[in-house]
Each structure stands twice: as structure tokens, then as C-alpha cells.
Image: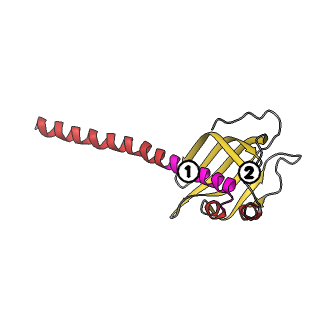
Amino acid sequence: MNSLISRSTALAAVAIASLLTAAPAHAQSDERAIVAVVTKFLDGIRTRDTALVRATVVAGATLVPVGGPTGLGVPSTIDAVIERTGKGTGPGNDERIETPKVQIDDQLASLWAYFTLTRGGETKIDRCGTNVFLLRKGPDGWKVFQIAATSRTEGCRAIAN
């Protein structure tokens, strides 16, 4: 009887341990996927690859600048950003993020990160601030549905490649 209880206890302990380690592994996988989506979005802007940018966002996604007298600027659609990106010539803007902080709850995630933006073909940082990407997880994976960003021209520090 004791060996049966010991085996049952051992099996229960193994089951609990596997559940406890599976949740963080799944969260780490989602976190990597979220960072990858945002990276693809920024890569698409830099390379003017509108198909790549479009693959990272949901229809109707928006960009909201934060700042100014009211605290919020005029929102624009990501479609408008994609259109401007596609019409440009030469290198696109080089926006880089640093040390992204990802928060996930079920099908909702946010990525918060310091960014710098260098205009295409230039080497001097044009502006910096904080980007917040909101993403949802659907049947097609993680996709951006809103971006909010602060922006300033002073106090910007370079991000190591």
C-alpha cells in the first residue's frame, strides 16, 4: 500500500512540475513571437517592404502619437503609414527598439520599448521616445492592432546594434 501511495505521490509531483514548467515555456514562446512581430514591422518600414509590414498588423490598426497640448496627437491608420512607406524612395526610416518589455494576458499583449529613429540614408538620430505596441493573438498568430508613441528630439541616446 505504501508503495502505491508513493507512486501516486510521485506521479502527482511530476504532473504538477510539468504544468509549472510548461506555462513559463509557453509564455517565453509567445514573448519571442511578439518581439519577432514588432521586429518584422520595423524591418518592413526600414526596407520599404509593405507586404512585410502588412503581414504584422490587423486591418484597421492605428498609430497614436502621445504628447502635445491635449496629450494625444491625431491618430492615423497603419494603412496610411504603409502607403507612405511604399511611395518613398531610397532607404526607409531606421527605427530601433531596445530592451522590450512584454506583458501578456491570454490573447492580449503589449510591448513597451525605448526607440530611436534615424531618417533613411542619414546617420544622426532624428528622434527618440517610447513605443507601445498592442497586439492580439488570433488564428493567424500575434498581430499589432495599435501603436502609441512619445517623441522627442533632445536627450536621445544611441541603441547598440
Give the label on residue 36, or none. 1
Give the label on residue 93, or none. 2
Residue 75 lies left or right of residue 69; in this view the side is left
Give amino acid for label 2.
Asn
Q: Which residues are magenta?
A: 30-49
Front position in the image: 32 or 83: 83
Q: Is residue 127 magenta?
A: no
Q: Is residue 39 magenta?
A: yes
Residue 99 lies left or right of residue 154; in this view the side is left
**Image quadrant occupied by the C terminus:** top right
Q: Secondary structure at mark 1?
A: helix
Front position in the image: 3 or 113: 113
**Image quadrant occupied by the N terminus:** top left
Relative vertical location of residue 18 with respect to residue 51 in this rendering, above or below: above
Front position in the image: 70 or 37: 37
Give amino acid for label 1.
Ala
Relative vertical location of residue 31 with respect to residue 45 in this rendering, above or below: above
Residue 71 lies left or right of residue 92; in this view the side is right
Residue 42 at what x, y percent from top left? Answer: 65, 52
Residue 45 at what x, y percent from top left? Answer: 69, 55
- Residue at (76, 60) in percent of width and height: 89
Q: Secondary structure at mark 2?
A: loop
Quadrant of residue 152 in the image? top right
